[in-house]
Amino acid sequence: MSKTIGSISIIGSGNVAHHLGKAFAGHIKINSIYSRNKETANELAEDIHAFHANEIKDLIPSDLILICVNDDEIYSVLEQIPENQSVAYSSGSVGLTELPHRFDLGVIYPLQTFSKARNVDLFEVPFFIEATNEVFAQQLFDMAWLLSRKVIFATSTDRKNLHLAGVMVNNFVNHLDFLAEQFLKQNSMEWDYLKPLIKETAMKLQSKRPFEAQTGPAVRGDQKTIERHLSMLQGETKEVYQILTESIQKHHKA
């Protein structure tokens, strides 16, 4: 049986660190928090009754150091941590072999969008686990199981694929919402009118595949409406509309 992780120190104080720190604090001792942003690190440390470390070297010794920073910073942060320390990071797009090798290095990746101001029910969030050895992987699995009932072992390639798909369904869709909001604003109309439609679109995908759920002028082949819409748009929004329309027509024609 693998050893249970009983204490954690966290590097980072952004959205992911905020949610995971608060969630794990209900199950595991959070010893200390470090972040380059002293203000948010201190706020998180106070919230979960942890020590606010001013430097990485000042972190309280723990069973695990959990790195929750931007992908580009993981390498440099890892280099500052002693090699005999067990470490996990929360990225979906950084592979284990891209980082300096150590015996206990792993990933605990929650596939979800996080904002500090919004509560997230982690029980249904998938957590993807990978590590440099099976014993440590099981420890991370058991730790994630404290928060979720959707914990899955995954390779670095699996995580990268999931992260890319996640960017499309979350970040890209959100940007489309932004373009729609800007269009309505330019035409003196309220963004709130679209909220029931956005909600129903998301709810429909709980029971239908995206291909089956597709509606609109592109899938109907309503070319006059498409041409009318294009005449109402300008710049990049017009280009995005045209590219997506052509993609929908291509796949549904096939």
Image: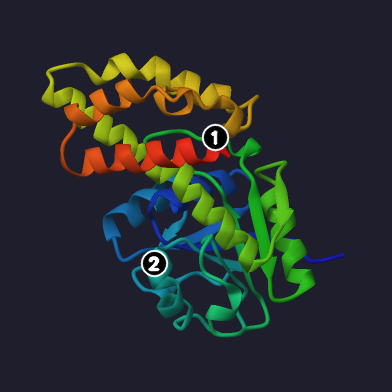
- Location of residue 125 (image quadrant): top right
Quadrant placement of the N terminus: bottom right
Q: Nearer the viewer, residue 110 or 249?
A: 249
Q: Is residue 252 above or below residue 41?
A: above
For residue 207, side relative to residue 51 (left or right): right
Q: Residue at x 43, y 66 (%)?
A: 71
The three-letter amino acid code for the residue at tag 1 is: His
* Position of residue 80 measured from the top left corner of the image (x, y, whole percent): 44, 82
- Residue 49 seen: no
The residue tagged 2 is 53
Is 11 left, or right, of 83 in this rendering? left
Q: Does 214 sit above or below residue 239?
A: above
Q: Report x, y in % for residue 196.
A: 40, 15
CA gap, disc 1 and disc 2: 55 Å
Instruction: In the displayed orientation, state which residue is furthest to the right.
Output: 1
Kindly identify which residue carries mark 1: 252
